[in-house]
Image: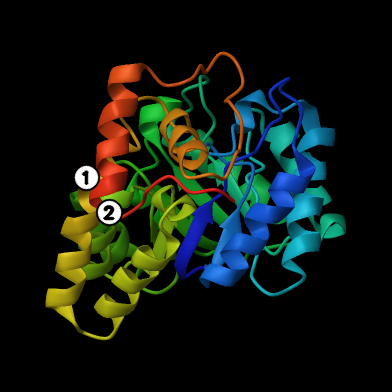
Amino acid sequence: MFHGLLVALVTPFHPNGDLDEAKLRGLVRFHLDAGTDGLVPCGTTGESAALRGWEERARIIRIVVEEAAGRLPVIPGVGTNSTEETVGNVRRLGELGADGALVVTPYYNKPTQAGLEAHFRAAAEASPVPIVLYNVPGRTGVNLLPATVAALADEPRIAAVKEASGDLVQASWIRRLCGERVALLCGDDALTYPMLCLGAAGVISVVGNVAPKPMRALIAAQRAGRAEEARRLHLELLPLAEALFLESNPIPVKEAMNRLGFAVGPPRLPLVPMRPESARRLHEALAGCGLEPARR
């Protein structure tokens, strides 16, 4: 389940800010057709911090699970900066039919490594599904260190770590200390190829929202030992991977998807639409990858 192209799914909204349920179902069908290996709704790219409480989050998860219908795994983001709330969220996943849970390091609190270990153990002990640890210090203000990941590897429900620190040395230490006990997932599209070289099982991808087939091709080439092809695809996708982070995620990916005809709507405040100059650079990167505006 925790391998290949796992797409960090955007949450589509109507212009008034309400959830666009029909569009969300359409996105799931798009990924089924594209051969995407799994979907990760309600994460950072899904604007988890702006969702309207558990009820809206649960509705999104139900829709994605219903539309996927067991044809690809659904691994929703359910982590918060409250251990009690996170534990409650993971406990609810069984009734929603999710296949796994993405649990981010607690943000703002800045817990110690001992606090992080205790937080994730509490979530794992309560969870009916396998857990992906999510380390994204640029967002949370705290870094989940390799030694802490290794200490958590004995928890049966902890199956993978999404490593989004941008530090290949840190990713290397996770691999060295954990081996095959915990699957390593890339959390930064621009580092997908080098992390696959380190033994990452796949990527939780933002780029996959707009270019799932090239991302899958990159992963397949590396797995098959076609190093030159994998490097070529990596370098071709690199400008797009960087352009999708010209402003805070998911501002650029929503701009890209709207330009390509997916009509996913605006981000929710406090995020605002992309600045014109940044949008122009993004449009150039899309065109460079052969992604041009189209009606859907």
**Amino acid at dot 1:** Pro
* Residue shown at the point (63%, 48%) measured from the top left: 41
Expressed as whole percent of the image width and height from the top left, the position of residue 291 reads 36, 52
For disc 2, the neighbor class at 10 Å (few under 14, some 14 to 19, many from 20) is: some
Residue 1, placed above or below residue 102: below
* Residue shown at the point (28%, 19%) measured from the top left: 277
Residue 75 visible in rendering: no
Relative side of 264 to 171, left or right:
right
Residue 293, placed above or below residue 186: above
Name the one closer to the observer, 155 or 48. Answer: 48
Name the one closer to the observer, 198 or 260. Answer: 260
**Amino acid at dot 2:** Cys
| Contact between labelled residues 1 and 2, with CB atoms less than 8 Å apart | yes
Residue 174, placed above or below residue 180: above
Relative side of 118 to 78, left or right:
left
Task: For the N terminus, give its image quadrant.
Answer: bottom right
For disc 1, the neighbor class at 10 Å (few under 14, some 14 to 19, many from 20) is: some
Expressed as whole percent of the image width and height from the top left, the position of residue 233 reads 22, 65
Name the one closer to the observer, 77 or 34. Answer: 34
Q: Which residue is mark 1?
A: 239
